[in-house]
Image: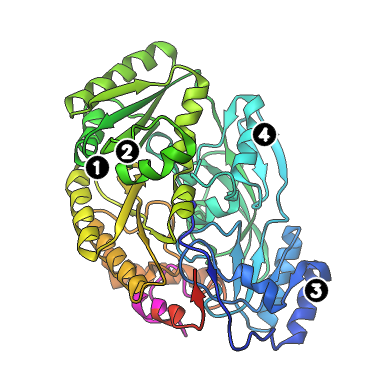
Amino acid sequence: MGGQAFLRCYTRPEMPTTSNPALLEALRRAVGAGNVVHAPEDLIAYEYDATIEHALPDAVVFPGTAEECAAVVRAANQFDVPVIPRGSGTGLAGGTLAVKGGVVVALTRMNRIVEIDAANRIAVVEPGVINLQLQEALAPHRLTWAPDPSSQRICSVGGNIGNNSGGPHTLAQGSTVNHVLGLEVVVADGRVINLGGRVLDAPGVDLRGLMVGSEGTLGIVTQATLRLIPLAPNVRTLLAIFDTIEAASEAVSAVIRNGVIPVAMEMMDQEIIKVVEPRIHAGYPMDAGAVLLIEVEGLPEGVVIEAQAVIDACRASGAREVRSAETQQERDRLWEGRKAGIGAIGAAVPAFYLLDGVVPRTKLPAVMHRVMELVEQYGFRCANIFHAGDGNLHPNIMFDPQEEGATQRVLDLGGEIMRLCVDVGGSITGEHGIGSEKRSYMEWVFSPTDLQAMERVRLAFGSVERFNPCKVLPGGHGCASGHAAEIAAHISKPGVYI
């Protein structure tokens, strides 16, 4: 999933380059002088992702091979500075911010599709490969890699692996971890190791699964062996139209109670429809309270039966109309509206804060009602566009950062929504990760003993203090003690946000 909270433009009283020329020289030896960036005006582009936080690195390097990545890590170790892996920079949790300075390892040069083994349904790729480019390369083989975040036009496979990304088709096909067979990884001491392999059940402890979703805190993925699945022989895309978001939420559970697990079940409320439809002309009715975009696939006979079961469940839940895409062009247009939703918000309002929580499907109606109550209490507008089938909420809180106190109120509201998700038995992330944004919320979900066990995993990989520090876990030497403190530190920096 990708998006952008808001762009920022600001000045600082001073923006010094790194004070360690010896480190820069070691980095140049590792990757070549042309692949090291350290001038202040160049570093600005790497001090933020798609969140509202920012932190300036000391240098950015662009390795071209696993060996160059390893050399960068060894150089950083020599000078005791942090290493922060980075893909396309579309993350939504501050996971690639250099909150303690250090070296950002940008993997965009490592963008080769090394192998497509159609017979064994395997692809081997480097981390900088863009998700959509991989899908386009697989299409002639009638294969696909299941993770398809809405940001797939720009997000990288390495970023998908780091965050265990999902997407609209997670409901039936699972998230990234279910589609990664093996990983080549540079670990904190500069060694290159291999986890997993080319088969589903590699022997030994599943360190491959441990690495997926670790957000760059355990190592740098330099190559991935991916499990591919065949494209379905038949697909049916439906648009169910409701007068209220509560009715649409009720329909989500009703569809599954009818014995159907769609490959995708996406919800868009009236606020996002008003933003998207004038730009994309996808065919969403402007007066709808909410719509469900539902897709079923399989053999033609089965698709007909499942589509009818979906239609029946939606009508029983109060759908005023259920439309079916009759051509590939209609289907593409409906999905274009969904995938372009976050970008459309960014073009329509000064700023927005995109949340990522999970709740049980049966709790969706009550949770959505409470979310809108909270938004109204705080005085903001909110556009909801999310993976309803697996209860993965994405409220987009729209605001003006020039308004005094607005940013802090947005963060307070975001915290209340996250707490609501946890209180009903859900979680604080479905696909965006924890990063620096939500790490203090981990204490709502895990006990001190749980968190200590996770910290020991980092110790085992030797990466506690130097590999992507101040991410995922709430503790950390020299890291802010909590989410509020972290945000306050960032937004108090000199500058003007736009």
SS at badge 3: helix
Lower sequence index among marks 1 and 4? 4
Label 2: how many residues lie within 10 Å, few (<14), some (14-19) or many (20+)?
many
Q: What residue did someone put label 2 on?
A: 389
Label 4: how many residues lie within 10 Å, few (<14), some (14-19) or many (20+)?
some
Q: Is residue 165 above or below residue 35?
A: above
Q: Is residue 313 magenta?
A: no
Q: CA distance from mark 1 to mark 4?
A: 35 Å
Q: CA distance from mark 3 to mark 4?
A: 34 Å
Q: Which residues are magenta?
A: 470-487
SS at badge 2: helix
Lower sequence index among marks 1 and 3? 3
User: What amino acid is found at the position of numbered circle 3 in the picture?
Assistant: Arg
Q: Answer yes or no: do the residues labelled 1 and 3 have beta carbons within 8 Å?
A: no
Query: In terms of depth relative to the viewer, which is nearer, 131 or 272?
Result: 272
Q: CA distance from mark 4 to mark 2?
A: 28 Å
Q: What residue did someone put label 1 on?
A: 361
Q: Answer yes or no: do the residues labelled 4 and 2 have beta carbons within 8 Å?
A: no
Q: What residue did someone put label 4 on?
A: 137
User: What amino acid is found at the position of numbered circle 4 in the picture?
Assistant: Ala
Can residue 188 be seen by looking at this rendering?
no
Lower sequence index among marks 3 and 4? 3
At a point 70% along the width and 42% down the height, the residue shown is: 113
Q: Answer yes or no: do the residues labelled 2 and 1 have beta carbons within 8 Å?
A: yes
At a point 45% along the width and 61% down the height, the residue shown is: 5
Q: Is residue 477 magenta?
A: yes
Q: CA distance from mark 1 to mark 3?
A: 51 Å
Q: What residue did someone put label 3 on?
A: 28
Position of residue 280 measured from the top left corner of the image (x, y, whole percent): 48, 37
Chief secondary structure of the magenta portion: loop
Q: Is residue 287 left or right of residue 303?
A: left
User: What amino acid is found at the position of numbered circle 1 in the picture?
Assistant: Arg
